[in-house]
Image (spheres, helix red, strand yellow):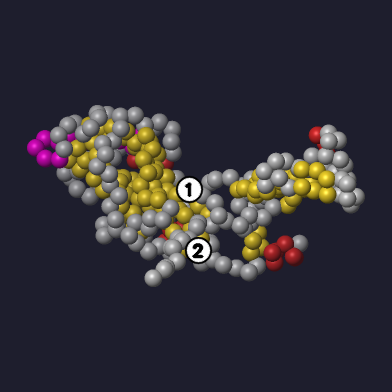
Amino acid sequence: MLTEPYNPPVADAQETKSPGTVATSEESAEQPNWTSPENAKSSNNFYATCLLEPILNPVYSELLLASNLGFALPEGATALGWLATVEKKASLGTYLTDAWVYPIKGGVVQWTAVNHASSIPWPTSDTVVSYGDASDLWGLEWTPAEINASGFGVAISCKSASAEVTASVDHVTVTVYYTEAESEDQVCFTTRSIELRSDGVVRQAREDDVWGTVIPDGFLPYTSPGGLEGRPSRGIIIPTQGDLRALPDSGTPNKLSATVKQRAGYHFAREAGE
């Protein structure tokens, strides 16, 4: 039996935020806390640090809790996935690895969600490592209100089995991918540039003997990459040069070209009232 291939939804938009709050969990006296955790709010070579000193057993750090991200997903949006990035390093190679990387919902670490911890050792120089992706919901369902809330975020812990090592985190970010609610009175512009090429198109002026090939190869509307591929894109086309009545060999000024202007989305209803 033939079946249609599954085509997952494509994100309408994506937003990346840095945390407004970063704290250490302080849940156990046996686990070392993070020092200066709020240094992980931005990438500036000031670090949240944690010293791990295993003696007989592996040592786990307290959780580094990054939240209060300031998302503003519109009402009716559907979250498709999200990823966290952690810019991190270790003072000693091969010994330090992730212990837990869990989502925070409503200010509570979600221990039943998918643990995105990696067994790859932390690098000894600043490296940005990603957890999750554009279609990964970390094993949970998310409403726009839950993502927009100050209690949404990510919790990170590391461990060392046999060596004294310092973990350093320079910056944490979260990127959310989502689709917008359908609305008949709304049009969304991508804010990306569009390239219009009239390759291989033959044009004719009002006189039958005036023909000209504009540029070799075909017509290609193109939106540059950036997570919005496949989305409809609308622009204002402004002719910049070219004369359809001119002969094709009459010089560069008579080659046809266009400039496309794009802007952020707005409502048709609002535009009609202006």
Say left or right for 207 vs 227.
right
Q: How far apart are marks 2 and 1 (CA)?
A: 16 Å
Mark 2 or 1, nearer chain start = 1
Q: Is residue 72 above or below residue 25?
A: below
The quarter in which the C terminus is drawn is bottom right
Residue density around tag 2, few if under 14, some if 14–19, many if 20 or more, within 10 Å = some
Say left or right for 72 vs 222.
left
- The residue positioned 30% from the left and 46% from the top of the image is 156
Instruction: Give percent across and percent down for residue 172.
Output: 39, 43
Q: Which of 181 and 91 is in front in this view?
A: 181
Q: Residue furthest front?
A: 209
- The residue positioned 43% from the left and 53% from the top of the image is 134
Look at the numbered discs 2 and 1 and tell me whether their residues touch, using CB distance below 8 Å: no
Q: Nearer the viewer, residue 259 or 87?
A: 259
Which label sits on residue 77?
Answer: 2
Say left or right for 79 vs 158.
right
Q: Residue furthest left?
A: 56
Instruction: Give percent across and percent down for residue 267.
Output: 66, 63
- The residue positioned 85% from the left and 44% from the top of the image is 243
At mark 1, the secondary structure is strand
The amino acid type, in three-letter code, at marker 2 is Ala
Instruction: Give percent across and percent down for residue 261.
Output: 70, 48
Q: Does the stretch in magenta take in 174?
A: no
At mark 2, the secondary structure is loop
The magenta stretch is 47-58
Determine which residue is flagged by label 1. Answer: 16
The amino acid type, in three-letter code, at marker 1 is Thr
